[in-house]
Amino acid sequence: MANYQTRPRRQILQYLKAHPEKGFTAEELAFALQQQYEKDAPGKSTVYRLLGQMVREEALQRFEESGSKSARFRLPGQTCHEHLHLKCLDCGRLLHMEEETSEQLLKEIFKTNGFAVDEYRTVLVGRCDACAGKEEA
């Protein structure tokens, strides 16, 4: 089946390209598109349908974060396997832990617990500097 570059499809891709540090649920993405495109935004059902289609076509990645059952979507290649990731509970940013720190932590976990952590599927959750600073103020 041909994947036509419809306006809603382009809007989804443009939005995700503009926000590479974050994965979005279908609900979050539909809301964000509504805010950005107003009356020209795709409807929620169109967003859900297109996300499923784009995942099947491998134009998007679908993933679930630790402790969440909500699927999130992002463009392919926006994840990496060389280090752990840090997810901010407030703003939703996905941060990359420094590789050396990540490697030391993973080695220590294995040494202490005899457990090899799957870097690709593990996300540590907390608050980024910006959000933690807001809380202190």
Image (spheres, rainbow, N blue to C red):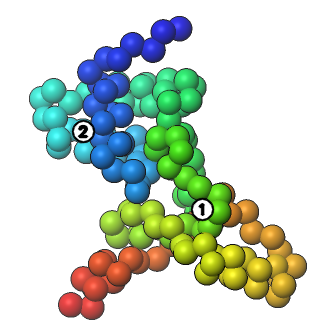
Q: Is residue 125 left or right of residue 88?
A: right
Q: Residue at x 30, y 46 (%)?
A: 18
Q: Residue furthest bottom?
A: 136
Q: CA distance from mark 1 to mark 2?
A: 26 Å
**Which quadrant of the structure image shows residue 68?**
bottom right
Q: At numbered mark 1, what does the secondary structure look like: helix, strand or loop?
A: loop
Q: At numbered mark 2, what does the secondary structure look like: helix, strand or loop?
A: helix
The kind of residue tagged 1 is Ser
Q: Earlier in the sequence, mark 1 or mark 2?
A: 2
Q: Residue furthest left?
A: 39
Residue 121 on image: x %, y %: 65, 58
Q: Is residue 113 left or right of residue 38?
A: right
Q: What is the tally of numbered marks visible in this picture?
A: 2
In which quadrant will I find the C terminus? bottom left
Residue 107 on image: x %, y %: 77, 80
Q: Residue furthest top?
A: 1
The kind of residue tagged 2 is Leu
Q: Residue at x 60, y 68 (%)?
A: 84
Q: Is residue 125 left or right of residue 7?
A: right
Label 1, on which residue? 66
Q: Residue furthest right?
A: 114
Residue 104 on image: x %, y %: 69, 82
Residue 126 on image: x %, y %: 46, 77
Label 2, on which residue? 33
State the residue in front, 135 or 96.
96
